[in-house]
Image (cartoon, grey):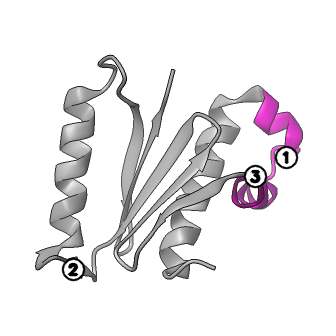
Amino acid sequence: MSKNKPLEAVVLQELSKWLLANDPSFRLLTDGEEEVGKSVVKGMGELNIDEPHKVRFHFSSIIGYGYDFSKEYGGESAKDIYQRAVENTKELSGSPMMETFVSDGVQDNFGWYITRFR
């Protein structure tokens, strides 16, 4: 069980939406339903980082990151950590052995971004 359920829900929602829009096999598997997609990602994926301020969810070659802006880590706001992570990921995207930046956004008090390995 996730330490931050609302943050996990945002990341699962955004992963499901992205996969439905970009992966025909996933769309077929889930009948194009976002709620089913969230269940599939949660059931078949792996919650790799589970902290109150941050989650990282792996689903095949897709990785969803989420940050709770109401939290801090090591004396730094999660929002600052999120902004730096997105900036660095965009800058290094596509480099050898690096993830490729796919999408990002802010929903309420949460920031999220998605990457993939090619």
**Residue furthest toward the left?**
75
Q: Mark 3 falls on what kind of element?
A: helix
Q: Whole-Å distance between the Cαs marked 3 and 2? A: 30 Å
Number of other residues with Cα within 10 Å of mark 3, as a class: few under 14, some 14 to 19, many 20 or more: few
Task: Name the residue tied to disc 2.
Answer: 72
Tell me residue 93's x, y (percent): 30, 26
- Residue drawn at x 60%, y 60% is 12
**Mark before the other along the chain sequence, 3 or 2:** 3
Tell me residue 62's x, y (percent): 56, 38
Q: Mark 2 falls on what kind of element?
A: strand
Callout 3 amino acid: Met
* Above/below status of 112 relative to 101: below
Question: What is the magenta segment's predominant secondary structure?
Answer: helix
Left or right: 50 as drawn, with respect to 9: left
Number of other residues with Cα within 10 Å of mark 2, as a class: few under 14, some 14 to 19, many 20 or more: some
Task: Name the residue tied to disc 1.
Answer: 30
> Which label sits on residue 44?
3
Q: Which residues are magenta?
A: 25-43
Q: Mark 1 falls on what kind of element?
A: loop
